[in-house]
Image: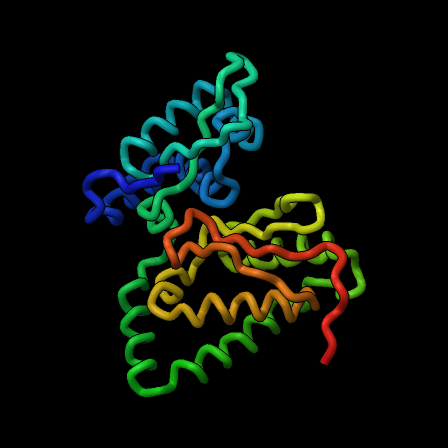
């Protein structure tokens, strides 16, 4: 995979304005690529109820603007042509177009808290509020797969672009976040991602493992969750 940003990286706000202001379908496609990518044009068409031709036209524009990039998926085959299918992921520029405009203020706030020695307490307080905001959506007695789906839906309501996928071997699930509304904070404070993983663990009542994060440059945050764990104690 080479999801490198295209030229003119200094203009994400211009791209965002053009994207949102002129074509909501294109914005929906970008959002779905961010949450479910790597994803093929055929899969996008199926999920959005569009023709393949319409999707490919939007994909071309998104690639030209540097918002998405090709992703190699050796096992994916274009059913119509029998050749490897092109799959797409959101670039870091594409991810930024889905974010709110508070990024610079957020980074400054994190820096200020770190300098004052208050960042750790702030992250802990946020973690407690975050757990409280999503815990009610998850039934602790439900099968793990249902808990993870419920968590994914709760996160989506808070602005995270989430999806759930089977993990390798069929013994785990992967909770994927293709968009994070607090990515700028997480980039300035890695403690934020660690806190988020602890919150997931608390709500699901199981140890989870973060494999990748948007804040560290991946195209998606991936958290692995075992399907048949022993419950945590204490």
- Between residue 49 and residue 144, name the one nearer to us: 144
Compared with 167, 150 (above or below) is: below
Q: Is residue 116 left or right of residue 34?
A: left
Query: Quadrant where the N terminus lies?
Result: top left
- Between residue 206 and residue 177, name the one nearer to us: 206
- Where residue 137 appears, as percent x and y from the top left, is 68, 63
Q: Which residue is found at the position 54% from the left and 26% from the top?
A: 76
Q: Which residue is found at the position 50% from the left and 80% from the top?
A: 124
- Between residue 221 and residue 12, name the one nearer to us: 221
- Where residue 142 appears, as percent x and y from the top left, is 79, 59
Compared with 219, 189 (above or below) is: below
Q: Is residue 202 left or right of residue 2?
A: right
Using the rendered view, name the quadrant where residue 89 is placed: top left
Compared with 5, 54 (above or below) is: above
Q: Which residue is found at the position 43% from the left and 59% from the top?
A: 181
The residue furthest front is: 169
Compared with 181, 33 (above or below) is: above
């Amino acid at each position: 995979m080479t999801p490198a940003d295209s030229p003119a990286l200094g203009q994400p706000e211009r791209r965002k304005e053009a994207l949102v202001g002129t074509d909501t379908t294109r914005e929906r496609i970008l959002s779905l690529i961010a949450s479910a990518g790597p994803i093929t044009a055929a899969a996008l068409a199926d999920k959005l109820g569009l023709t393949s031709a319409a999707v490919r036209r939007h994909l071309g524009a998104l690639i030209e603007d540097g918002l998405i990039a090709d992703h190699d998926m050796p096992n994916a085959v274009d059913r119509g042509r029998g050749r490897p299918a092109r799959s797409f992921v959101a670039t870091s520029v594409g991810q930024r177009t889905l974010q709110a405009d508070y990024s610079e203020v957020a980074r400054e706030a994190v820096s200020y808290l770190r300098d004052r020695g208050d960042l750790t307490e702030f992250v802990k307080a946020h973690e407690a509020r975050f757990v409280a905001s999503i815990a009610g959506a998850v039934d602790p007695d439900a099968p793990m797969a249902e808990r993870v789906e419920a968590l994914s839906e709760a996160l989506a309501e808070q602005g995270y672009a989430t999806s759930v996928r089977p993990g390798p071997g069929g013994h785990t699930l992967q909770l994927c976040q293709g968009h994070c509304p607090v990515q700028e904070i997480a980039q300035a404070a890695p403690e934020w991602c660690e806190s988020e993983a602890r919150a997931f663990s608390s709500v699901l009542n199981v140890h989870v493992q973060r494999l990748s994060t948007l804040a560290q440059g991946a195209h998606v945050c991936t958290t692995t969750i075992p399907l048949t764990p022993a419950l945590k104690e204490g």
